[in-house]
Image: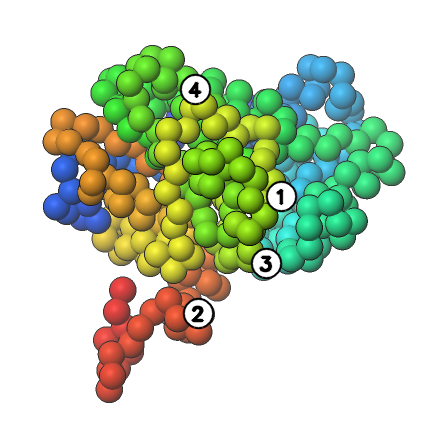
Amino acid sequence: MIYNSIIETIGNTPIVRLNNVVKGIPGTILAKVEYFNPGNSTKDRMAIKMVEDAEKAGLLKPGGTIIEGTSGNTGMGLALAAVAKGYRCIFTMADKQSQEKINILKAVGAEVIVCPTNVAPDDPRSYYSVARKLNKEIPNSIYPNQYDNPSNAAAHYATTGPEIWNQTGGKITHYVATVGTGGSMCGTARYLKEQNPNLVTVGIDTYGSVFKKYKETGIFDENEIYPYLTEGFGEDILPKNVDFDVIDTFIKVTDKDGAIAARRLSREEGLFVGWSSGSALHGALEYARENLKKDDVMVILLPDHGTRYLAKVYNDQWMKDHGFLETRAFGSARDIIN
Ligand code: PMP
């Protein structure tokens, strides 16, 4: 089969059984490996849908510009769509993001503007505000706004949900995903819960993000907001794509636990995944240890690929500098734990 362009290869990613990191835990635990998408992340699915929905609505015309605030993966998906369809792309990113992510976006022809991480979302310097301002200034430009754009969750409702349902033969009982914009959790969850109302969803949140507290109390607590290192999920805002009704429970995962779990997926399963995939695994196993029964089938969405984290999670020195790797006293390099 010959694809007409790279964007036709988005989706239909494999589900892989986890064999080693799940030892001693009841039930079947499976991974939906989203790095098989052409931009190496789950965000390709919603990027192409946001572009095509904007075209259909007459908002994006030939020669137009796509402007987005992105941690990198949405940018990659949008950039691929832009190359295939002939648009210009400008991305604003927080300065805590990996240099690799910035370089990758530039490699596929996008312009990248780096903005400070630790300013409030409504500060004019934040990556949200800069994207909005450029959208006002540049004629024939769109600002898809992945946080509030319904095409985001709709892409996962249309593709990720049905794929998981079919690949597991309808046997899935638990779905686990990190929650950033909420698209990959909530679009998929909505589809799966329509097929099986008893299906349980577990959202993975970070320390420094507002979601878990909001779900449990209905309070948007600013004390929950503080800097963290993990990239791509957890938020200091409530995106419209986060539908709290389809997320049954949240688990928070530390930067360190996510990083160590990502390395375990690489070394013990051969799944060379990104940091948030480790966070998803760590939270999933925490939930599974207490709650999973032997006939249950849990699917964990692994959002992206490890190459983007070579300078961080997959760099032993960086891990040690952050206190994420301990070395034994008198140990050699071979004695690094984890
Ligand atoms: N992990 C990574 C690496 C991401 O780029 C994203 C997207 N922001 C997520 C997790 C969370 O996905 P979503 O935006 O669909 O909630």
Ligand 1 closer than 8 Å to label 3 CB: no
Q: Secondary structure at mark 1?
A: loop
Query: Mark 3 — residue?
Result: 96
Q: Reply above or below: 79 against 7.
A: below
Ligand 1 closer than 8 Å to label 1 CB: yes
- Residue drawn at x 36%, y 19% is 192
Structural crowding at the residue carrying mark 3, measured as other residues with C-alpha within 10 Å and reported as few (<14), some (14–19) or many (≥20): some
Q: Reply above or below: 151 against 325.
A: above
Q: Looking at the image, which is closer to me, 180 or 268?
A: 180
Q: Which mark is residue 190?
A: 4
Query: Mark 1 — residue?
Result: 70
Query: Mark 2 — residue?
Result: 322
- Residue drawn at x 73%, y 45% is 122
Kind of residue at badge 2: His
Sequence-wise, the earlier of marks 4 and 3 is: 3
Q: CA distance from mark 2 to mark 1?
A: 25 Å
Kind of residue at badge 4: Arg
- Residue drawn at x 59%, y 28% is 240
